[in-house]
């Protein structure tokens, strides 16, 4: 059974025995990416994923900071989010709140290095504000794209990623970096990066756990699969695309 390979679409696929191992592997990849970026360019800009899957990875990153041999230079690390729910920062559904609890409150990162989506604002205003934060941080000229060193993403069982849901308007957005996206299934706005941004990243890392994701994982990772899902449209033009799956999310047909 293959556990770690590059497929014909140049996707690096790693299958971990369980969700704990997935979190450990994701934490190691985060640190590797951070140290490489800081060595090469003096700083590391990362967009965190929301949802439940990455929480354990964030907790492992924080835990490892207790060991002086694996501490990261947090003053050189700049945190963003790939998407956010349209809720205040202290709301139970807030991706910011999850990352703050699991990681950011447990490491010595300067407050000004944490770029929160101001999701307490009107949705369009919050998106505009965040796009401005990206333009300032990355010193973007008009029409220039930010190049994140790492964008962490999850996968919904409907094939969405970030807050790019099937059939939603943001999927076709190419003029803005970050938008308010109406999600019919939730009857609410979500705030999300648009596809040109992960396509311009140095590395995109999908973290997927659980048997409920196995059918969509199989469809997406089967060679020459039909382009059906938003997650399939994330195709870094000059960057790496990694899929870390636990055993439950990996499907026997694609392991072979
Ligand atoms: C969010 C995420 C979303 C998530 C997937 C998977 O804001 O919820 O950005 O894209 O990654 O829905 O979520 P789970 O990890 O909870 O399965």
Image: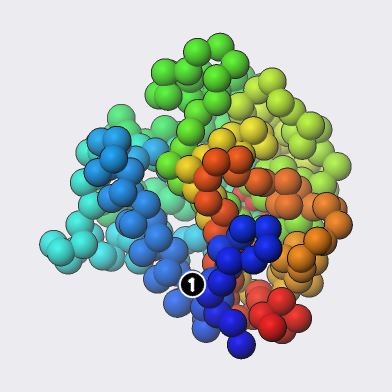
Above or below residue 129? Residue 32 is below
Q: Say if residue 238 shows up in the picture.
A: yes
Q: Nearer the viewer, residue 122 or 241?
A: 241
Q: Residues within 10 Å of mark 1 (few under 14, many from 20)?
A: many
Pointer 1: what residue? 22
Q: Position of residue 166 (x, y in %)?
A: 82, 47
* Residue drawn at 65 percent across, 22 percent down: 176
Q: Say if residue 198 shows up in the picture.
A: no
Q: Nearer the viewer, residue 53 or 31?
A: 31
Snapshot quadrant of residue 194: top right
Snapshot quadrant of residue 58: bottom left
* Residue drawn at 56 percent across, 63 percent down: 12
Task: Identify the image quadrant of the C terminus.
Answer: bottom right
Q: Secondary structure at mark 1?
A: helix
Q: Position of residue 123 (x, y in %)?
A: 65, 26
Q: Position of residue 229 (x, y in %)?
A: 79, 52
């Amino acid at each position: 059974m293959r556990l770690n390979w590059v497929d014909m679409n140049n996707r690096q696929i790693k299958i971990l025995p369980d969700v704990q191992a997935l979190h450990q592997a994701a934490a190691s990849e985060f640190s590797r990416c951070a140290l490489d970026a800081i060595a090469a360019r003096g700083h590391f800009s990362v967009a965190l994923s929301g949802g439940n899957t990455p929480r354990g990875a964030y907790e492992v990153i924080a835990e490892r900071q207790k060991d002086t041999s694996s501490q990261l230079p947090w003053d050189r690390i700049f945190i963003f989010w790939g998407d956010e729910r349209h809720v205040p920062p202290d709301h139970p559904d807030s991706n910011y709140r999850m990352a703050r609890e699991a990681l950011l409150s447990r490491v010595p990162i300067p407050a000004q290095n944490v770029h929160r989506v101001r999701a307490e604002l009107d949705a369009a205003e919050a998106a505009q504000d965040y796009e401005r934060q990206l333009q300032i941080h990355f010193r973007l000229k008009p029409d220039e794209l930010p190049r994140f060193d790492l964008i962490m993403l999850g996968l919904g069982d409907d094939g969405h990623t970030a807050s790019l849901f099937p059939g939603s308007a943001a999927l076709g957005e190419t003029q803005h970096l970050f938008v308010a996206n109406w999600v019919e299934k939730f009857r609410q706005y979500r705030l999300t990066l648009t596809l040109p941004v992960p396509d311009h990243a140095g590395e995109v890392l999908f973290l997927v756990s659980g048997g409920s994701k196995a059918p969509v994982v199989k469809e997406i990772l089967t060679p020459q699969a039909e382009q059906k899902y938003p997650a399939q449209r994330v195709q870094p033009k000059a960057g790496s695309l990694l899929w870390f799956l636990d055993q439950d999310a990996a499907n026997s047909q694609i392991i072979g």
